Image (tube, grey):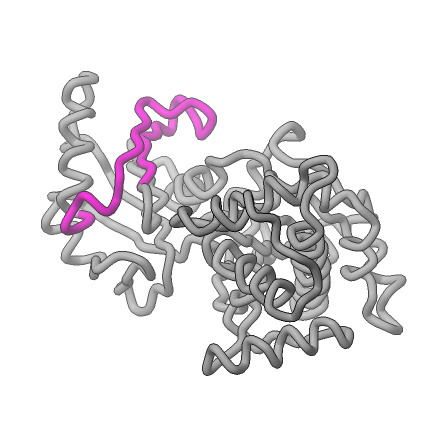
Amino acid sequence: MTEEIKLLLAGDLGGTKTSLAVFSLEAGLRAPLLEGRLPSGRYPSLEALVKDFFKQMQEAGLDPQALDRACFGVAGPVVNGQATITNLPWRMGEQQLAEALELPSVTLINDLAAISQGVPQLADNDYHTLNEGEPTPHGTIAVVAPGTGLGEGFLVWAGTRYRSLPSEGGHVDFAPVNDEQLELRRYLQQRFRHVSYERVCSGLGLPNIYAYFKDSGYAAEPAWLAEQLAGASDKTPLIMQAALAEDGPVLCRATLDMFVSILGAEAGNMALKVMASGGVYLGGGIPPRILPALEQPHFLEAFRSKGRFAEMLGRVPVKVILNPKAALLGAATYGFEL
């Protein structure tokens, strides 16, 4: 951490909520001076939201003008200091934000870059291990994060510390690995111009798998479930909860099983693409909620099923990030290390 930055505002910006926190160099990353969580959709811009948080700072006895820098993780691509959030009409620029908020410096990074940057800061109780593996010291680390969408990123060793790099890998072509997944792809190809991994491996994608099994006649949909799904704005939690329940509906269990296999396969793909000898971390909101399913053999079987590279992937550690503040922690880490 540089000695020049003493007080930092870090943020994790999402389409639904924005988490903000003030960190001091003296107190460290594990002891923010103030934290806040605000509903993103209620604000016309990031500037308006942050100014509301500044009021909370003042009420807590903290002066916003004492901030040396702000670093925000953004749920969307960041190009030349400009960014948009996928599910919000906000347009952001680092220079414009610095001027509007009267801050010396503002940095925007991709949200997966933020989550990735937080990985080296995780304590043992911040993650759950699916495969111990044999991590290589300073090896590349991959992050695959199914939440509302599918985010991917990775970390490379930069001589003295890890540096995160963003990716939009969740939008690459979905590659079926068996006949059942091939039929899923054919089904979705009729509905979407492009069938990406996000279409089948995210909160947006889980209902697509469910619809495939239902429409293909795989099993009957219980009346009670049909009624609940019809009235739900977000079907994903209902499907996951039903799948994890004892004697849950066949449709839901088949959906979650395929989801887990696809996630395992794509996590293995990511491990190969970046040679993630340091490990693969599963972030996002979904993995912590489906741990019992991820602990079943078919996740790691799909992860390792890479032909001649199966043995190598068996040595790659696989962990689930449990700390919901990983992205905020990563944004703070990135901001202090600039």
Side of 218 where 210 appears, left or right:
left
Left or right position of 158 against 253: left
In depth, the one of 50 and 222 nearer the eye is 222
> Where does residue 337 sit, x and y in percent of width and height?
42, 45
**Magenta stretch containing residue 231, yes or no?**
no
Which residue: 34% across, 64% down? Answer: 78
- Between 48 and 87, the residue placed more toward the observer is 87
* Res. 91 in view: yes
Quarter of the image where one finds residue 96: bottom left
Any magenta on residue 34? yes
The region drawn magenta spans: 18-46
Task: Indicate the position of residue 245 as horizontal and vertical percent values.
Answer: 68, 36
Which percent across, then down, holds residue 335?
Answer: 37, 44
Residue at 40% across, 39% down: 332
Q: Splitting the image into 4 quarters, where does residue 224 fall? A: top right
Residue 264 sits above or below residue 318 on the image:
below
Give the residue furthest to the front: 223
